Amino acid sequence: MMRQYELVERVQRYKPDVNEALLNKAYVYAMQKHGHQRRASGDPYFSHPLEVAAILTEMHMDEATIAVALLHDTIEDTSATRQEIDELFGPDLGSLVEGLTKLKKLDLVSKKAEQAENLRKLLLAISEDVRVLLVKLADRLHNMRTLDHMPESKRLRIAEETMDIYAPLAGRMGMQGMREELEELAFRYINPEAYRTVTSRLAELSERNRDVIVEIENTLSELFKKYELKASVKGRQKKPWSVFRKMESKALSFEQLSDIFGFRVIVDTVEDCYRALGAIHTTWSMVPGRFKDYISTPKQNDYRSIHTTIVGPSRQRIELQIRTREMNKVAEYGVAVHALYKDTPGKVNAADHAISKETNAYAWLRRTIEQLAEGDNPEDFLENTKLELFQDQVFCFTPKGMLIALPRGATPIDFAYAVHTDVGDTCVGAKVNGRIMPLMTELKNGDEVEIIRSKAQVPPAAWESVVVTGKARAAIRRATKNAIRKQYSGLGARILERAFDRAGKVFSKDGLKPVLHRLARKDVEDVLTAVGRGELASSDVMKAVFPDFKDERVTQAAKPREEGWSKIRNAAGMLFQIPGRASRKDRQVARENGAVPIRGVRGDLPVRFAPEGAVPGDRIIGIMQPGSGITIYPIQSPSLTAFDDQPERWIDVRWDIDEATKERFPARISVVALNAPGSLAEIAQVIAENDANIHTLSMIRTAPDFTEMLIDLEVWDLKHLNRLISQLKENASVSDAHRVNG
Ligand code: MN
């Protein structure tokens, strides 16, 4: 195990002014916290954070990052707390360690290749700081190096996750060395057979070609000497995974040297890169289509190099990469290397980057690199590496580990609709991380969301203003529209049933089918909805089905009402009417079926109140007003007699009000007051003190000593109204107060 002083020395080699105290403190603290813990290999647990720190020293990271590496498993696996780390090492370091603790949660989530991209984004979103990500990658690399010690059942999962998520992430951050090693390690576990085959074949070829490779190296070196170029040439066997992938994707033969060996030419300056290229291309012929100049147009991850393939001295194809020493470091260590290697002027210039559009999600890398190019102090680099990436998104999981990406501000309702429209439509509640939470809760990165569903649910229209995703909003709108349509068509069916019944006929939906054309409607539902909306009169439907039907409304009105109708109250106390003298059976049927399930005044049909108003606590009846919805009357309202001869217009409604309803309702009262100075003011005051609003007030009769007035009020409910009336009655200037039609 690496000693404390060895670690400090390693950092000192590339950073002479290293903060030794910090490294020493982190080393001792982590060692003590992990105590006697062991790894699966039997090694002391502390060897793991130490190795992770060592990997980061190879990448020449600053001491804060190295300290975080030492501490990265303490909160999760030991008695250490964030608070303690804050106190000992400062809150900045504490938040980095906590970031790594949060990332651990991800390891528990099942990962499918198809959601790898989102998982990478989640990783970035949770990381918040590029140093967290670098430690996480180093952590993963060490775990992969020691994967043999893990139980076999876990190896494949970890290897696949490495291949799908971590290796590409390292690659995009420009850390080719890290990416390559992760891929090779993962390949061994994911496809052991292919790995063995490719490896042994490569070894064979390498053995057979040993002389050829030395020969090419020498030839190139001599060529550069002739051109007075200082360059080092290194033949390099490609790694099994990249060979295998190339063979798979391009179906290339194993035998071609250029597919297995590459030569890297390292020079001092950018000018030398092009001189070397010139020397090579004037000596041997190049293979068309293989030349790429990533120096004038760097890759998004700042990879810069010249690639070319030539037909070499012995007629074999040779792949070459030409780059400067610094470019090579960037290629190996990517984003990390910027921490300590300040660019020579012009190396990273804005123009180069302007060429490559910011379609790549790694625009932050460009920003940080630009910061570096502009900043005086290269150490600022890591101080300014807050990841701004994907901060406008949150990533949440289903209980089965499916990853759902949502815009920031999304709620469990958005989540439900993102999973599936059906899930959204039937959503009635949600558990977030195992706890029931309000559906308006704003989701956070990494939340696990379980949707509670009910088949009976119709998404409330009010959700539309709560959700942030377009998908949810559109689905809610659609579901609300359907629900309203369904209510109208249910209402229409009931109106027709009653109208047919009244005429002594039996209504059936099938009976409408042959006459759809006569009604100019496309289907039965359409007819029912039109009747429910009041766009189509029930008598017109009657006439369509029974052409010799005479509108009875005329005769009906002529008849004395008592003969034609019976009033019945159903179980809920709702009044409605049935034709003729009702038998007991009629009453029974009416009780069972009488209530049309319109959910009252807050529902989805256009609803108005009768002029005299109606308040919660009143029993109410709705009257269909063709074309304009429903008017609500208190059941005792004398105005209702006007509709006695049109029973199909009567609708049983009920209040659908709960405690959350903060709405006032209209009621009309009559007040008779003494004509004394200030009496009107007193009445107004009583009303105001009772928390009621006056909507309109009209004097309807004035005598020398009295005035009668009608006041339209807005009150909470019947109790509220009654209390107000009795308060008015108690007032000295009021001789009478009562509700109108109430
Ligand atoms: Mn670890």
Image (tube, rainbow, N blue to C red):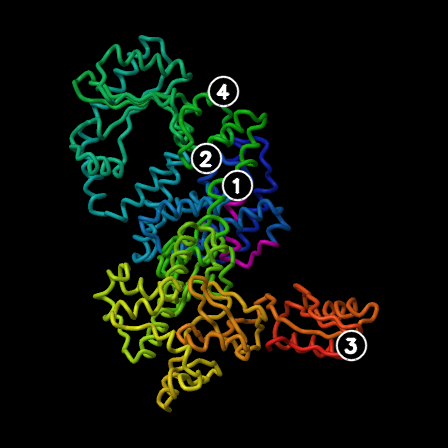
x and y percentages locating residue 582 in the rendered image: 38, 88
Q: Residue furthest bottom?
A: 584
- Where residue 278 sits: x, y (%)? 31, 12
Verify CB contact (< 8 Å) between mark 4 and mark 3.
no
Crowd rating for badge 2 (residues with CA inside 10 Å; few <14, some 14–19, many 20+): many
Q: Position of residue 281 (x, y in %)?
A: 26, 13
- Measure the C-alpha gap from mark 4 to mark 2: 20 Å
Q: Point out the image quarter for the C terminus.
A: bottom right
N-terminal of the two: label 4 or label 3?
Answer: 4
**Residue where numbered disc 3 is placed:** 731
Taking the spot 55% from the left edge, 59% from the top edge, the residue there is 79
- Classify mark 2: helix, strand or loop: loop
Q: Are marks 4 and 2 in contact (CB under 8 Å)?
A: no
Q: Which residues are magenta?
A: 67-83
Whole-number angstrom distance, CA of label 4 to CA of label 3: 92 Å
Between marks 4 and 1, how big is the CA–CA gap?
25 Å
Pick the residue in front: 290 or 357.
357
Query: Which residue has dot 1 on it?
Result: 65
Give the CA distance from mark 2 to mark 3. 88 Å
Dot 4 or dot 1, earlier in sequence: 1
- The local secondary structure at tag 3 comes to loop
Residue for point 78% across, 77% down: 731
* Nearest to viewer (mark 2 / mark 3): 3
Q: Which residue is mark 4?
A: 344
Where 453 falls versus 413 (above or below)? below
Q: Amino acid at mark 1?
A: Thr
Label 3, ligand 1: CB separation under 8 Å: no
Residue contact between numbered discs 2 and 3, judged by CB atoms under 8 Å: no
Question: 10 Å neighbourhood of mark 1: few (<14), some, or many (≥20)?
Answer: many
